[in-house]
Image (cartoon, coloured by chain):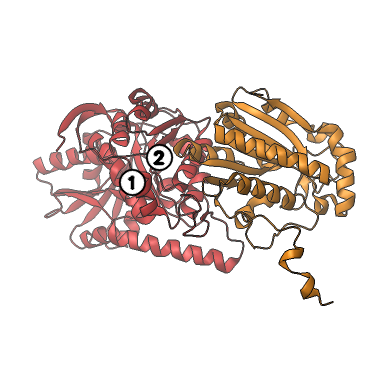
Amino acid sequence: MNCDVRLMKGNEAVAEAAVRCGCDGYFGYPITPQSEILETLMALRPWTTTGMQVVQAESEVAAINMVYGGASLGRRVMTSSSSPGISLMCEGLSYIAGASLPCLIINVQRGGPGLGTIQPSQGDYFQAVKGGGHGDYHCVVLAPDSVQEMYDFVAEGFDIAFKYRIPVMMLSDGMVGQMMEKVVLRENRPRKTDAEIVAECDSWALTGRHPNRTHNIITSLQLQAAEQEAVNLQLQAKYQAIQQNETRWDEYHTDDADVVLVAFGCSARICREVVDMARSEGLRVGLVRPITLWPFPSDRLGELAQQVQMLMTVELNAGQMVEDVRLAVNGQVPVCFYGRMGGVIFTPDEVLEQLKQHL
Amino acid sequence: MDVREIICEQNKVYSKSKILTDTTLHYCPGCSHGVVHKLIAEVIEELGIQQRTIGVTPVGCGVFAYNYFDIDMVEAAHGRACAVATGINRLAPERVVFTYQGDGDLSAIGTGETIHACNRGESIVVFYINNAIYGMTGGQMAPTTLCGMKTATTPDGRDPKLHGYPYKITEMLAQLEGVCYVTRQTVASAVYIRKAKRAIRRAFENALAGRGLSFVEIVATCNSGWKMSPVAANKWLVENMLPFYPLGDIKSVGE
């Protein structure tokens, strides 16, 4: 068992994980605050070791379409960007979802809209969870709250992506991407061999037309309405299975809680501190941290709503996830919201103060 | 004599390439796409690279090319074929990858992806079907529409003051180091078709040898969009398109 422990940035952890977990290709374009992913990969030169390819594309549009090409081969491919770049990738993301291709996309969010700021934000929740691109589709969205999770979610993201042939998005932010923490580097996974890819993906991927099958076609186009609806129904069935099997969340002091905070990513890290501070003052506060933002832990929040007096959603945006929390709670108890925008980050005292105003 | 006695193996003088499926082409009668498909299929068959070849189709009339070639194919978003082909080429360099794109796809919305794939010298073949019009969407102005040419969006003819000038991306791409072969061909007559096939073969041979990117423009007709009979369209192409888009090799490295 490899128990290598290192101190590194979230962005560096993603690059390290990509090489170590058998990723075949990375295609990216520089944008703050995530450029270290591409820089670290270029410095690691994985094409000389594992054979992983790394390409600096001419744009985010090109990068996501290179991912589309690589994914169509049945290879493990990924890209990363930050908010404005992810907007540019949304067209390609819709095509990838429509063609049922597996891949990993990392969004190290910054404040918006527009060119916005390079400071951390969670303003892309709607874009990540509700679609972003056109048409009825979902990505599985993983929200890391630590450098360790940025590392771990690379391998986990690929596993989910291939299990369901779906794009997986890791929705990080400029804080988790830039901060340094110790990371346990898990056991390496080798890249899949050509034979393994044929065994795993020959029914759909571009493994090369051979005498034992007809030609494979990767497309998201169905001109006949009934055929397109059949594709939509297949996608929806897949999404239902993912909702049943892959919903992940973390709880902190919820057992006896009167009030539950709901927060993801770096906001959840801050809210853990808020829970500790509140408890030291005798307030029974707990925390639910959705790890998958889609699928969302709606059932668990609905259950908790029967136990608590109130929920408070805490996000670095104007209130996005709070809509899903309210849908989950369905009016059983009040759900209030506190957020900061534009790259401003709340302190634990500030959040606790806000919480007390609602009690 | 019964017609069934005439249709027999010993009287056969032509058969389509095995690389073409039996699917009926959706192209309008007289359109150049069918001929170009045939040539590409023949070359793939002659080189024996069916299993090694992966095609990337565009958005435009060529979108359904994946139904006609009996090889593994992927349909790219509008203009992005060269980026998709890059992803494939980098991860499966032993494959022979080609894109098949129209003038709107390649030289309007996909200009950036095209230039940069050429500049990186991706070892792929790019087919650029230039019929000076957007066929699939109903005959609108393309980047290559000639001045004065009437289309659905230039009903009074293309006026460069209003719509800009037609441009020759093929000559521009020939300037890039990563491109090993740049040629412009047409399929407007039997002689042109033979020359075009030689160019297509050479492009695939370059990809097999890893020489760099080969770019093959085919000046094509869109008789429906041009509102002409197939015969008149071929004549119009020779008289009007070829003076502006002259045929021949523009760049050929390693000769």
Q: Earlier in the sequence, mark 1 or mark 2?
A: 2
Label 1 to label 2, Cα distance in Å? 9 Å
Residue A267 relative to residue B22: left or right: left
Q: Position of residue A157 (x, y in %)?
A: 32, 46
- Seen at 76% across and 69% down, the residue is B7
Kindly identify the amino acid type of the residue bearing the numbered disc 1: Phe
The residue nearer to you, when weighing A341 against A218, is A218
Q: Is residue A247 above or below residue A314?
A: below
SS state under label 1:
helix
Residue B77 visible here: no
Q: Residue furthest front?
A: B10
Q: Position of residue B135 (x, y in %)?
A: 74, 50
Residue B34 relative to residue B94: left or right: right
SS state under label 2:
strand
Residue B22 relative to residue A3: left or right: right
Q: Residue furthest bottom?
A: B2
- Seen at 13% across and 47% down, the residue is A283
Q: Position of residue A138 (x, y in %)?
A: 42, 54
Image quadrant where one finds the N terminus of chain B: bottom right
- Chain letter of the residue beneath label 2 in the structure image: A
Disc 1 target residue: A158
Q: Which chain is red?
A: A
Kindly identify the amino acid type of the residue bearing the numbered disc 2: Met
Disc 2 target residue: A78
Shade representing chain B: orange
Q: Contact, CB < 8 Å: mark 1 with mark 2?
A: yes
Answer with the quarter of the image where residue A278 lies. Answer: top left
Instruction: Specify few, some or many for label 2: CA neighbours under 10 Å numbering under 14, 14-19, or 20 or more.
Output: many
Residue A198 visible here: yes
Residue A87 relative to residue A128: left or right: right
Q: Position of residue A224 (x, y in %)?
A: 61, 65
